Image (cartoon, rainbow, N blue to C red):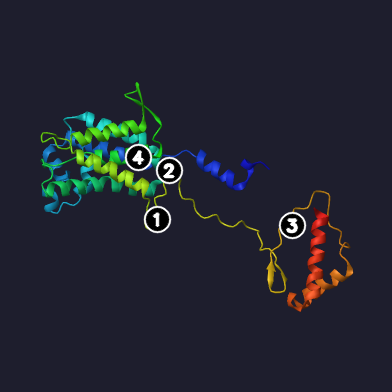
Amino acid sequence: MGFQDRDYQRESLREEAMPTEHFVTKAFMAICGIMFFLELVSPDRNGMIDNLSLSTHAIGQGRLWTLVTHAFLHDPSTPMHIVFNLLAFWWFATDLEDRLGRLRFIVFLGVGIVVPALVYLVTRAIGLLPEGRGVIGASGCVNAVLAMAILRAPFQQLMLFGVLPLQAWVFLAVSLALDALNLRRPDSLVASDMHLAGAAAGAAMFFMPLQGAIPLLWSRRARPARRPRKGTTPSLTLYRGEEAVQPSRPETARPGISPSPGSLPSDIDSLLEKISKEGMASLTEAERQQLLQASERLRGRKS
């Protein structure tokens, strides 16, 4: 039997070959697309954005949902914002969803949305960075996805704009450097601190996987415990004095060869009869040794 024919290997191959649907990735992109369409057709676009965008004022009024909803809105006046965000998200998020599974990928996206939002609120609340009308966009979450995916495979080759070959780690480094340079620009409309916070959150979850309530095992999906096969029986144990000896499983009999019913010596046959009537504890030490020697001779004859 070849390695690929064994039961556990066949199960692994079936799992890897099974096509994934990327349900969470598609759902995230669909929500962003639907919200963008509603922004375009809404008779009160500004009111919709004000109610769902993130700001210290909104949180002060108790609109805690803006910690999440801001990520699904994009500026209708700059459609390339949502286009680039969703393209980058699709390129990298599908692989992460395959690796993490749906539930853990949802948790990961939640962290990628909320952590940049908290950083935004803290930096504005203490006056470290200026606050505008509010912030919208999925860039913080997208940067978390980029950081996680690129740290998993830093030397993969990317084609920037379809023409420029670039290693993934270089792309991430340049992107973070531009965000860092843009951080202190007072006229900037981009929340660069959220970009950096998202990338930091993705990197932190890559290097420090949680093993408690949220077990993020990045290298592969967690598999359910293998159930015991039906029809298996516990192996027998022979005892020699106080020491337990676990014999190896007998080999499957070769086709055309069957053990002869009269092949056991009469003394061994009597010992087996004694065991069946009185139990293993009834044997003396000499009888135990005799039984073990006979067992070893039979194993040697079969081999």
Q: Is residue 123 above or below residue 43?
A: below
Q: Which mark is residue 250?
A: 3
To which residue does mark 2 refer? Answer: 99
Residue type, mark 2 in image: Arg
Q: Which residue is mark 4?
A: 25
What type is the residue that disc 1 sits on?
A: Gln
Earlier sequence position, callout 2 versus callout 3: 2
Residue visible at 23% across and 45% down in the picture: 116
Amino acid type for the residue under numbered disc 3? Pro
**Closer to the N terminus: mark 3 or mark 1?**
1
Location of residue 180 by image quarter: top left
The answer for how far apart the CA atoms under marks 3 and 4 are is 51 Å
Residue 150: give x, y in percent of width and height. 36, 37
- Sequence-wise first label, 3 or 4: 4
Residue 168 visible within the image: yes
- Please report whichever mark, 4 or 2, sits nearer to the chain's N-terminal start: 4
- Looking at the rendered image, the quarter that the N terminus falls into is top right
Q: Residues within 10 Å of mark 4 (few under 14, many from 20)?
A: many
- Residue positioned 88% across, 66% down in the render: 265
> Which residue is denoted by mark 1 in the rendering?
211
- Name the residue type under label 4: Thr
- Of tags 4 and 2, the one toward the viewer is 2
SS under mark 1: loop
How far apart marks 2 and 3 lie (CA) works out to 40 Å
